[in-house]
Image (spheres, rainbow, N blue to C red):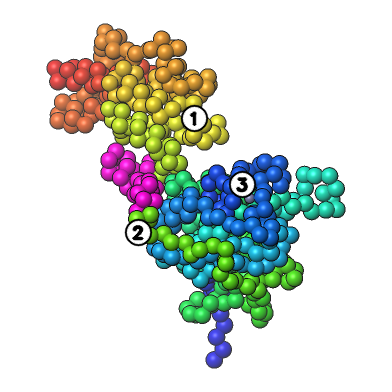
Amino acid sequence: MVTTPDPTVTARARYEPVIGLEVHVQLLTASKIFCSCSTRFGNPPNTNVCPVCLGMPGSLPVLNRKAVEFAVLAATALNCRINETSIFARKNYFYPDLPKGYQISQYDKPLAEHGSIEIKLDGSSKKIGITRVHLEEDAGKSLHEGFADAAEKTAIDLNRTGVPLIEIVSEPDIASPEEAYQYLTLLKEIILYTGVSDCNMEEGSLRCDANISVRPRGQKEFGTKTEVKNVNSFRFIRDALEYEIGRQVDVLEAGGKITQETRLYNANEGKTYGMRSKEQAHDYRYFPEPDLLPLVVDEKWKGEITRQLPELPEVRRQRMVNEYGITEYDAAVLTYTKELADQFEEAAKAATNPKRVANLVQGELMGRLKAKNLEITQSPISMRGVAMSADLVESGSISGKMLKDLYDLSFGRGKDFAKVYDEQGRPVQSSDTSALEKIIDEILASHPKQVEQYRAGKKTMIGFFVGQVMKASKGQANPQVVNELLTKKLEA
Ligand SMILES: [Zn+2]
């Protein structure tokens, strides 16, 4: 009997992608990893260089202690085990931006191993293993534009040569482009929290290469992988992986074979292209770097470093949920950056009702920021301003409607809440009971049925009446006063 494949199952669904990511992160040290040259980005080309980072004969590298501390901090945050002894190795290859002919890296004895982070996907979580974190030096940069005769020539800027990097290699645990995206987002967030890198992708402080293969679902052996390089945003990586999975499945379905190769992603076309084979000399010869001693991070030093580790985002979110009674979603938004989370916590601690501060950020601040295309870090209303406004509402001094108006003015004028509140003459909401009582009388008179229900014991009707009065007062009334007056009249 001939079995035909179920036509409802696409070819793609019969395959399973296997993805591993290599992330390079530049460390925020003031000087390079093996010399005292500045690491500053954007200086004139070839001004931050010396015989050491240029690899001149006779020059000797000296390891930057700060780079080690940063690498240990990052590796610890990624739950890695720090190896007490790790070895620097020369990775030999020729490239115009590498005048030494080798890069100092770590090979079989890396700084740290056996880590993991836990990504969240559709409400469940998945652990992605981190094989290793090692230290190495960055290479220079080839420039193809921004100078005279750029059309004919390539220029080399060696300022980046010797900037400290960590390479973070994941296990092939990533099973979809979306998981890759979530992994990278979380990884970046954790690194940012440790403060060891600015993770600025535009300036190249965070770069990612992806290894990808597909295999028929259920098969244990990995398929042949390709490596996708030169992708400069997480979104593009997701797109590149999506494309590459489709391409590999098509090749296999047509009876072809995947060639192990490096491919470049063209974001404009949304496609990957194989590099010419001579550009991918993968035959690095590694050998121990003779000019550097083994790196020893003993328990004492490790302890000193890891004591500086701040509370990491996931732990912080959970604590904020417990401590301020906010939702997980609130906590996720409020920990967008460490600075924002710090500001929020400062404000929440100062305010009478932390939950109200969180609600105002979510409800009133975020919407206005989005409408103006601003990041929360660019908000005219500071967290202190949010705390102040929360307290004013909490005490009944201003109404929700007044708060909205004041927020609008803040955004319109680009001024913080306290300033606008002063400029408006520190308004307070009406608790003029005679005007309110008139409104209440009218509302009770026009809703006899609801009054009857309340008096028959349906006390929850009070909410309905408060709503009606607030509406009639255009939000100016103090809800607490309205509640008291209503109760008095209904109970009379
Ligand atoms: Zn140098």
Q: In the rendered structure, which amino acid carries the disc numbered 3?
A: Cys
- The reply, left or right, for residue 235 in relation to residue 317 is right
315 in the magenta segment: yes
| Label 2 – label 1 distance at C-alpha | 43 Å
- The reply, left or right, for residue 431 in relation to residue 179 is left
346 in the magenta segment: no
Q: Element at badge 2? A: helix
Where residue 123 appears, x then y in whole percent? Answer: 38, 55
Q: Quadrant of the C terminus?
A: top left
Residue 322 appears in the figure: yes
Q: Quadrant of residue 321?
A: top left
Mark positioned earlier in the residue sequence (2 or 1): 2
Residue plotted at (71% across, 47% down): 46
Residue plotted at (45% across, 52% down): 69
Ligand 1 lies under 8 Å from the Cβ of mark 2: no
The residue labelled by disc 1 is 379
The residue labelled by disc 2 is 299
The residue labelled by disc 3 is 37
Q: Is residue 281 above or below residue 450?
A: below
Region in magenta: 303-331
